Image (spheres, helix red, strand yellow):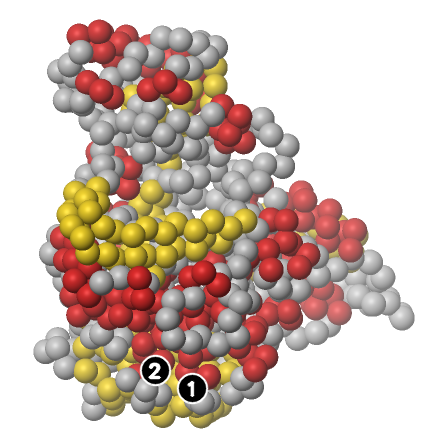
Amino acid sequence: MSEKISRRNFLRTATLGAAAAGLLAGCGNSAASGSTAASTAAGTYTAGTYSATATGINTTTPVTVTMTFSADAITDVQIDVANETKGYGADIADEMVKKILDAQSSEVDGHSGATITSGAIKKAAESCINQAKGVAVAPTEASKAETVVPDGLTTEEVESSVVELGDITPDETKDFDVVVVGAGAAGVPAAGWAAELGGHVALLQKQSIVVSQGNCGSAIIKSKSTEAGKKMWVHMTNGLCDWRADTSLLNAYVENSEEALMWYLNRAGLTDQTEYGDGSLVDSVKDPSSLLHNDEKEIFAYMCTSQDLTGVWKDRMDTYDFGDEHCYFFAPWIGPKPKNVGDVLATVLENVQAKNSNLETFFNTPAVKLVHADGKVTGVIAKDESGKYIQFNASKGVILATGDYMNNEAMVKRWCPDVDGYDKKQYQKTGDGHIMAIDAGAKMENLGHTKMMHDFDSGLMYEEPFLYVNMEGKRFCNEDTGFVYMGNITKYLPRYNGANVDANHPDGSLGWYCQVYDSDYMSYANSPVPEQVMTKYIPGAVENPQGVFTNLIDTYKADTIEELAALLDVPADELQKTIDRYNELCDQGTDADFGKKSAYMHKIEKAPFWGVRKHIRVSSIDSGVNTNANGQALDADGKVIEGLYCVGNVGGVFYGGADYPFHQTGLSLGRCYTFGMLAAKHAMGQL
């Protein structure tokens, strides 16, 4: 049953991590074969063996927990996580068995870095305990409304989401001014702003916790920028989006992102200001060790990327001349990994709720259908853990902030096929908001959806144009390519089926290649990193390395090429052949094979040798339904759908290009903060 829940309460049984996502767990009961269920007088349990399932990372094959009870104790626990992702949930069964047996309870700490799977294990274990106690347990599959497919979508797309578009008679009705669907980087600000503006607000979340990935959200600081400089930023950004962005949205970001970012930092306790005021508050930002995670201070670090775009701006791929004009952006970074913006947003929500009782939160309550008629949205129907349908009426508007559709395979194949075959960084992002909006008359933005793909986790110096080889040991491109565009090139490389491949790709996934360089790299790298810094990216080299996902680091050092090849899992003979050819081209001073600049051609000959196995994954798909600068959804004729807002990755067209523009650190999250705020202000009549 849905409940109003504070961050302190829901953090008791959920660990916040960079890959945090929900526990849409279904619980069932069954006796194991050969077990008996004879009652024991005065016992806590009915002795026997019970099983339950819960949805983990793999949404098609659930986690299964089987527990055996005596009259007074849990005597055995078996956990099946074979179909969870390697390096995440698939490796934690033994650890969780011990914790449950030692505690004689499902109320145990999860595994940091495997939040989804450990949460599913605890959920299923709780069901087993309830069964043994004779407590009624919800059925594994709650009833669902008949599948209805709106124009513009397919049956497979709808059925791969949590959306239910058939006739639904709600079991309960609640009335609010604003209903926000999704507690992430756009939804938490939207709910917080609407509540602070006096609205009675419901925040619905499919998962059991606040969920957002990433470590940085940025803003344009108006008080330090010139008017022409801001317009130059819009022009530059549109160019990086293949000139397909809706510049009214870019301008809305420029004019409002400072206020949105500072509101977020303030509510997180990261500024010295009690309220947002006039002018820039950049200089008032504090180190995030002052956050309310007092027991976790040591794992937070702080740095700011700030840049005054003036004169000639350039990166590896593009150059833009701002002349004497100024456009200042500010990008405070939260971390180190695995902590991320999701942790801070949980603090924001807790702090806003502490001062605004008019904001109610409903976790484990996915929205399944918008309530709409005659081009107007008036509410949303959601479904709680017991399967009960609750209609949340919204007199001022529904704000959809449910994230992207990367885990809806049918939607990926249709709307962004470039990312099909790649592993995904998020889970349970099934396009729910997109589908509900389209059902209400919204139009999906044109094909050519924007993707964000990179790998900042396996090793450092990812932009260095060292020798690149595929997983067959062969060179495949001019390495002087922006790292964030390597997803496009790796579409044509062989799949790899080794460590860290997602469980949804049993035959291997795309996006794998290796960087290779020698011990002279400090003399020729553009931004060399000393060996002692790289060491924590070598598996097992550092005990309890900080600021990394230990299951994703993939950097190696070896005395011979043959040894390096074995560590990278590429054929040694082919790698040696490739290096011999590369060294020959370096001696010639020209790259006749791929045309790389001679300045980047450096022989690989001095031991020890280095290699980084790169794993390009999908961070987000940043395209949604057409919206205006207020975040209002638009129909096929460009007309506003009254009462419906789509923000974050449910909304568009903020980008428009095939690839996310990486010219400004934190633009993606900054966009989410900004349009969550704008939608709330508009719904509350403040725009």
Marker disc for residue 678: none
Residue at image mark 1: 197
Identify the residue at image location x=79%, y=66%.
46
Residue at image mark 2: 681
In the rendered image of this protein, does residue 458 appear above or below residue 478? below
Label 1: how many residues lie within 10 Å, few (<14), some (14-19) or many (20+)?
Answer: some
Residue 611: % across, % down: 41, 22
Q: Secondary structure at mark 1?
A: loop
Identify the residue at image location x=80%, y=66%.
45
Residue 169: % across, % down: 40, 88
Identify the residue at image location x=22%, y=63%.
226
In the rendered image of this protein, does residue 559 appear above or below residue 59? above
Identify the residue at image location x=54%, y=38%.
550
Residue 526 in sight in this render = yes
Q: Is residue 488 left or right of residue 90?
A: left
Looking at the image, tell me whether mark 2 or mark 1 is earlier in sequence order: 1
